[in-house]
Amino acid sequence: MQSVSTGYVDVHGKRVFHRYLKSGAKKDIVMLHGWSFTSRDWETPGLFNEYANLSFNVYAPDYPGFGMSEPSDFYSVKRGNIEASASFIKDYMQSLGVEHAVILGASMGGGMAILMGMAHPDMVDAVIAVAPAWVENYTEKMKNIEKPVLLVWGSEDTVVDPHFGNKYRSAIKNSQLEIVEGSKHPVYLEKPKRFIEITTGFLKSL
């Protein structure tokens, strides 16, 4: 198992902390955490190594104002309003020299991944959105997403109702929905083996 590296990167004049594991491959994946989480939570289920083993370079920032990243008025988000997030993801990727990537996010981060898929499709290879939060007002616009999208939900999620999964799957033409039985909101922490099975299968299919 490879060690995950940590450091800071300058994004729009702000110090953004991130974790990363470079496999030396030409494929990249960016992972976005939820409101009550940080990039550290992707380490618990071993996702950095799992995706690096599929020949991805793996990057996971602490969103500005979360974890160890400096706050930024430019990228500020609030509960229910994550509109600025697509600009941050674009700028973060550009600061790394990453031209395009799979965007994976959970809850708030899942919503951010959806918004990135709509705002900057040329920089998105695919989207993995785990119970994406605060994007119900964008359902109509989701029809414009053309890249592959994997939606993952816990059957017992009480934070973002699983019925949104079917709603978003219907809106996004190139999408699939996986319901993980017995899991609550953070599927990747509650059912890590199943989550890894689902997401690695999707990544291999791209």
Image (spheres, helix red, strand yellow):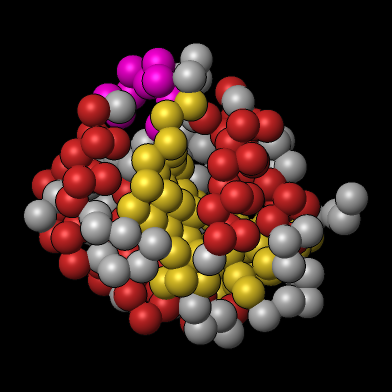
Q: Quarter of the image holding residue 9? A: bottom right
Residue 154 is left or right of residue 206, and the answer is: left
Give the image location of residue 146, x and y in percent.
29, 69
Relative to 5, say whether 46 is above or below: above
Relative to 180, say whether 71 is above or below: below
Q: Residue furthest front?
A: 205
Examine the rendering and report whether any part of residue 135 can be seen.
Answer: yes
- Residue placed most toward the observer, 94 or 140: 140
Give the image location of residue 168, x and y in percent.
23, 44
Residue 23 is left or right of residue 12, and the answer is: right
Q: Residue furthest right?
A: 1
- Is 122 included in the stretch rendered in magenta? no
At 20% from the left and 46% from the top, the residue drawn is 170
At 58% from the left and 84% from the top, the residue drawn is 97
Magenta highlight: main SS: loop
Give the image location of residue 149, x and y in percent.
38, 56
Tell me where the magenta segment starts and ends, as one range.
153-161
At 64% from the left and 41% from the top, the residue drawn is 196
At 42% from the left and 58% from the top, the residue drawn is 127
Examine the rendering and report whether any part of residue 116 can be seen.
Answer: no
